[in-house]
Amino acid sequence: MRETPIQETTRLLRNWARGDQEALVQLLPRVYRELRRIAAHALRNERAGYTMQATELVHEAYLRLVDVNQLDWKDRAHFLGVAATTMRRVLLDRARRRLRAKRKAHRVPLNLDETLHLSSNQSRELVALDDALQTLAQLDPRKARVVELRFFGGMDVTETAQIVGVSPETVMRDWKMARSWLLMQLDPHP
């Protein structure tokens, strides 16, 4: 019986995790388009003239991912979730460097609208959101993961449910609760 593309991707991921570098070579063309989609979503609200492009973000994330040792890839969805997290960290590292360079690393409230769009042209807002998300992760890791995948990774409810391992309905409940909690944390005086 012939493998489906998703099964083949999962097999390549697992072989790569076991040290098969040829599997990585075969894997990249299969996931590159999806990685570019995630990167484009992550960069969608960057300020005009921002120097990082989706391709560069994918490459930065790739360099971090290939350096990961002993990660047991469950499947394609798990890989894409980790890639989205890695891209978020790349952007946050850049935002923190910009803040350090400007020596203005004080906390600024972030205004999130109903759909949780981030105006990421302000590094302080991105860092404030990350700080709040880390606090949420300590309180409720699943809700924080849902926000990370939906907001930073651009994943829809079904993709998020698959990665987190819950129903789409649970993802929506987690999303609503996490969004409300984040709004309170980031703007305590609405």
Image (cartoon, rainbow, N blue to C red):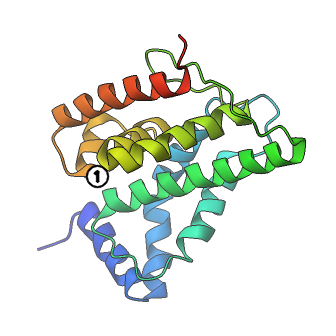
The answer to which of 56 and 181 lies nearer the viewer is 181
The residue at the far top in this view is 190
The residue at the far bottom in this view is 19
Q: Is residue 84 above or below residue 51?
A: below
Residue at 33% x, 76% y: name it.
Answer: 72
Q: Position of residue 32 (x, y in %)?
A: 51, 58
Residue 172 shows in the view = yes
The answer to which of 6 and 91 lies nearer the viewer is 91
Amino acid type shown at disc 1: Ile
Q: Is residue 182 above or below residue 15?
A: above
The residue at the far left in this view is 1
- The quadrant holding residue 143 is top left
Instruction: Determine the secondary structure under disc 1.
Output: helix
Residue at 32% x, 78% y: name it.
Answer: 14
Q: Quadrant of the N terminus?
A: bottom left
Q: Position of residue 41 (x, y in %)?
A: 54, 37
Q: Position of residue 131 (x, y in %)?
A: 56, 42
- The quadrant holding residue 5 is bottom left
Q: Which residue is mark 1?
A: 163
Position of residue 88 in the picture relative to residue 57 (left or right):
left
How many marks can you see? 1
Residue at 34% x, 35% y: name it.
Answer: 156
Residue at 50% x, 77% y: name it.
Answer: 25
Label 1: few (<14), some or many (≥20) within 10 Å? many
